[in-house]
Amino acid sequence: MRKILTVSAFFALSVCLLPHTANADSASAVAGKMGNLPDGAAVYKHVCQSCHMPDGKGAEGAGAHFPALADNPKLQSAEYPASVILNGFGGMPWFAGMLNDQQVANVVNYIRTHFGNHYTDTLKPSDVADMRPHLTVEDE
Amino acid sequence: MPHAHHSFPPTRRQLLTRIGTLAGSAALYQAMTSLGHAAGTDFKGSPSLKGAKKGTKILVLGAGLSGMLSAYELRKAGYDVQILEFQSRSGGRNISLRGGDTVTELGGATQKVGFAQGNYINPGPWRIPYHHQGLLHYCREFGVQLEPFIELNHNSWLHSSGAFGGKAVRYREFASDFTGFTAELLAKAIDQHKLDDVISADERAHVRDAMKSWGALGSDLTYKKGNTSSLRRGFERPQGGGIDGAPIPSDLFDRQDVMKSGLWNWMAFHERLDMQTTMFQPVGGMDQIGKGFTRQVKDLITLNCKVTSLHQDQQGVTVTYNDMSNGGAVRQAKADYCVCTIPLSVLSQLDVQVSDSMKAAIMAVPYASSVKMGMEFKRRFWEEDDQIYGGISFTDQQISQISYPSHGIFSKGPAVLLGGYMFGPAAYDFAGKTPQERIEEALKQGTAIHPQYRKEFSNGVSFAWSRVPWTLGCCSMWTEEARKTHYKTLCSVDNRVVLAGEHASYIGCWQEGAILSALDAVTRLHKRALGAA
């Protein structure tokens, strides 16, 4: 619970009008802002493709990789990519604070209907809302 | 009583003198540190590991700073050490790019760096706080020459698209006005007895005086246009010599504009312990540190080894790797112990035989995305036209900041500045672009601060850390929750394996983290090895 909150604070501030100084862990650091992300294609282009690549095929690194979204059976259930986006996975950061429910739903629906994927069921923002951890006042 | 004086405790100075005489300056330094004189980070001097069991082999994975330092200290202790490195170079994230270098990123985009002779950009670490005493210690020990890095420049620009009509303002103008107006508000509130319930009468006078001095206020406690404020923010017509030498004071900004601009963020930025003066950089590029470390352990390093698995049992550790110098041939290296400095973003995807809790710790740390832009211009227009010598200008645009070289000041010819340094959303966005698109965007955004940009631009290179094959990101991002659950496990010796690197420190994303983590890891591994011997 606490984890998500800390993170939300980090990214929520990042998308405000002014960039801010990032958390104490970055040698740096100034988190630049993001433009509008009106649809799934925009979220993919401005966030996801930095690692998963414009063609959704991922990339091979030093004995490790960015997984492909193309032909990835793990996309069968929309909840799986939504959960990874909200919580992160291994080296992949969480995006629960940076993306709202609508944006998470949009990008999940986008990757499940592009890159050779043809799933017909869609994820609704309310589904994403249900997956977010509930934060207590104490957490804040 | 004849012996009464013996019962007096020695003074602090007497004690230090005694320690110095008896044990030499290293002990003196250590004692001073523990008594609170020379405190920097948690660096307590280089470890003096002794008595390794002869023939004990230790395999180090990764020839970044933590790996090379681990190897250096372990060999000194008497171990038989070998380093395997993925890249065709040592140094890890300690790296500089120069003309003729090639950057190939995941996705295949390749950039050839076109900088003129002698110019460079540091795409990774680029500045060293004075209190990073571990790193500074080894720079001295390994003969790496350092020079000041200029962090705060009062004549640099602060820019926000939504403030001051989108025009950049000078740091000194903004900082003076922000400080002046804030001090005025507080001084007047005190003077008008509006804070009587929270500040005692005696303290009121002190705070009022402090505000007057700190904010450059007049005797009426007002911050106003005149010589007093202009001696901070700068004059409309500067002080001159001769008959027309009288200066003309400058207009102040509107207080509301100052307060709502948000530009005070950048004043606060330089106040962080990490950013305080004095900061340093190596002469000739950050990679001089990596090269200094490499000189110490070069004979131990095998380059081009792509590790695929790390196994261990009661007898020892076995590392399997592809020898990329020989067509990727599968090879194995065996040792008694292993120091693994592979970034967690990569390690979490390898076949690693450690406890479940260690596996969970390795999986628990995501890596930040960061992008840097190195841009060469035909001349130092920031110096020649704007009188900006080193330091950083800030903007609310994606590029976030423009930093001017702290070295080569006043030299003629082309020079390289940092044309963008991004974390967070802007870094994801920039990393997702092609190198050409990144340069174009950095030029467009930079022009809002420096109209000379297009005319003077020569060439540029971008470095997107999330597309670097050997890190898949810039550096570790710990949350408080993950720290609580996983940090101690991550740093513990797991049977015969210990991890090291900035990720195993509380100084994440800084080179000092790699140094202190390595020293701690080898110290504990040494104890483990002695216990098991």
Image: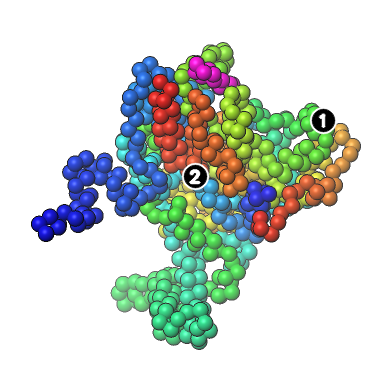
Q: Quadrant of the N terminus of chain B?
A: bottom left
Relative to residue B393, is residue B72 drawn left or right?
Answer: left
Q: On the same chain: label 2 and label 1?
A: no
- As for residue B142 lying within the magenta part, the answer is no
What label sits on residue B506 in the rendered view? 2
Q: Residue at x 86, y 33 (%)?
A: A118
Q: How far apart are the two marked residues, 2 and 1, measured between alpha carbons?
A: 43 Å
Name the spot of residue B215 as percent of width and height, x first.
44, 74
Name the spot of residue B374 as percent of width and height, x first.
51, 42
Relative height, residue B87 to residue A37 (above, below): above
- As for residue B313 lying within the magenta part, the answer is yes
The part of the chain drawn in magenta is B308-318
Between A18 and A124, the one lying in front of the other is: A124
> Is the Cβ of the residue at disc 2 closer than 8 Å to that at disc 1?
no
* Residue B224 seen in render: no
Q: Residue at x 67, y 44 (%)?
A: A94
* Residue A36 seen in render: yes
Disc 1 marks which amino acid?
Gly
Name the spot of residue A18 as percent of width and height, x first.
61, 59
Relative to residue A44, is residue B179 drawn left or right?
Answer: left
The disc numbered 2 marks a residue on which chain?
B
> How many residues crowd mark 1 within 10 Å: few (<14), some (14–19), many (20+)?
few
Relative height, residue B147 to residue B499 (above, below): below
What label sits on residue B383 in the rendered view? none
